[in-house]
Amino acid sequence: MNVLMVDDEYLELEQLTQLIYNRYPHWHLFAAEDGAEALKIAADRPVHLALIDIHLSGESGLDLAEKLQTLSKGIKFVVITAYQDFEYAKRAIKLNAMDYIVKPVIEKELYDVLDPFEKRSDTPAVTPVLQKGLQFVQKHYARNIHLQDVADSVHVSSNYLSKKFNDELHLSYNDYLSRVRINQAKNLMIGHPEYSLQFISDTVGFSSQNYFTNSFKKHEKMTPSQFKREKFGTQDE
C-alpha cells in the first residue's frame, strides 16, 4: 500500500514516518513538505492513503486533498491538525476523510486510526517474528549489522529469516536495510542541509560514500547530491 504523508514541519513529518514504519514496515511511505511535492509523488504512482496536515504553508491541506482525488482514484484521507476546528472537520468529511487527528500525534491514537487500513490492505501484515526482526533493524541500522545478527535477536536461523524477508516483504535483507538507511539519510538531508554527504553516509551506516551514492540512486532514481539540489538548490559531493 502506498501511503503519502504531507506536513510542512520536518520534525512532525519525521515522527509520523517513524511511528508508521515501526508498526507497518511493509507499507510504502512517501513524505512531502508541501503541496507541489505531494502532487508530484501522486502523479508518479497511485496513492492509497494520504495523511495530510490541514495547515500547510501557502495552501490548505484540504485543497490539496481535492487535487489528490483527481490523481489517485479511491484515495483515502486522514486529516491531521493542531486545531480542533468544526468547519475544517465538516469539509474533511465531505472529502471522505476517514478520520481527524489532533496534534500532537499520540501513538495509540494514530494506530487506532491506521489499523483498519491494515486490515483492508491487499498487503498482508508481517508475522511476529519478522516484525521483531524489522524493529531490530530500525533500532540498529547505523551499526554494521548482518542478517545473522538479526536472526540471533529473534532466535531463528538466518536462512529462515531470509525467506521471511523474501516471502513477506518481497525484498532481500540487504535491500530492506538499505531502504531504512536511505530513509534516515533523507531525513538528515532535509533536517540538516549543512551536513556533508560523507557525514550522513557514515551516520546511517554505509561503509563508504560511494556505496551510499549507488544505493541511493538505485532506490530514489537520483543521487544524494541531486536530491539536495532539488530540495535546497545546493550540491554537496
Image (cartoon, helix red, strand yellow):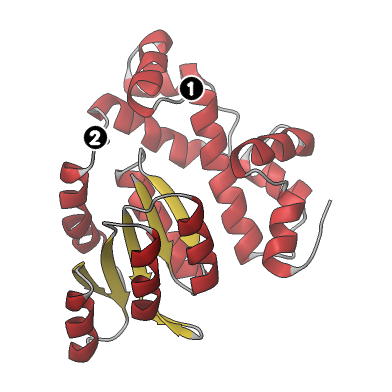
Q: Nearer the viewer, residue 96 or 14?
A: 96
Q: Tell me, yes or no, whether the two marked residues, 2 and 1, touch with CB atoms within 8 Å.
A: no
Looking at the image, tell me whether mark 2 or mark 1 is earlier in sequence order: 2
Q: Label 2 belongs to which residue?
A: 125
Q: Which mark is residue 172?
A: 1
Vertical side of 100 occupied by 150: above or below: above
Which of the 4 image quadrants contains residue 218? top right
In the image, 171: left or right of 52?
A: right
Which residue is depicted at the point 73% across and 46% down?
223
Residue 65 makes an appearance in the image: yes
Residue 54 makes an appearance in the image: no
In the rendered image, residue 184, in percent from the top left (x then y), is placed at 56, 49
Which residue is depicted at the point 65% across and 46% down?
203
Which residue is depicted at the point 50% across and 37% down?
140
Quick one: SS at disc 1? Answer: loop
Q: Nearer the viewer, residue 220 or 172?
A: 220
In the rendered image, residue 126, in percent from the top left (x then y), is placed at 27, 31
Mark 1 crowd level (few <14, some 14–19, many ≥20, 10 Å Cα) = some
Q: Which mark is residue 193?
A: none
In the image, 6: left or right of 77?
A: right
Q: Amino acid at mark 2?
A: Ala
Q: Nearer the viewer, residue 76 or 14?
A: 76
In the rendered image, residue 185, in percent from the top left (x then y), is placed at 61, 50
In the rendered image, residue 112, in percent from the top left (x then y), is placed at 16, 57
Quick one: SS at disc 2? Answer: loop
Q: Amino acid at mark 1?
A: Ser
Which residue is depicted at the point 36% across and 43% down?
27
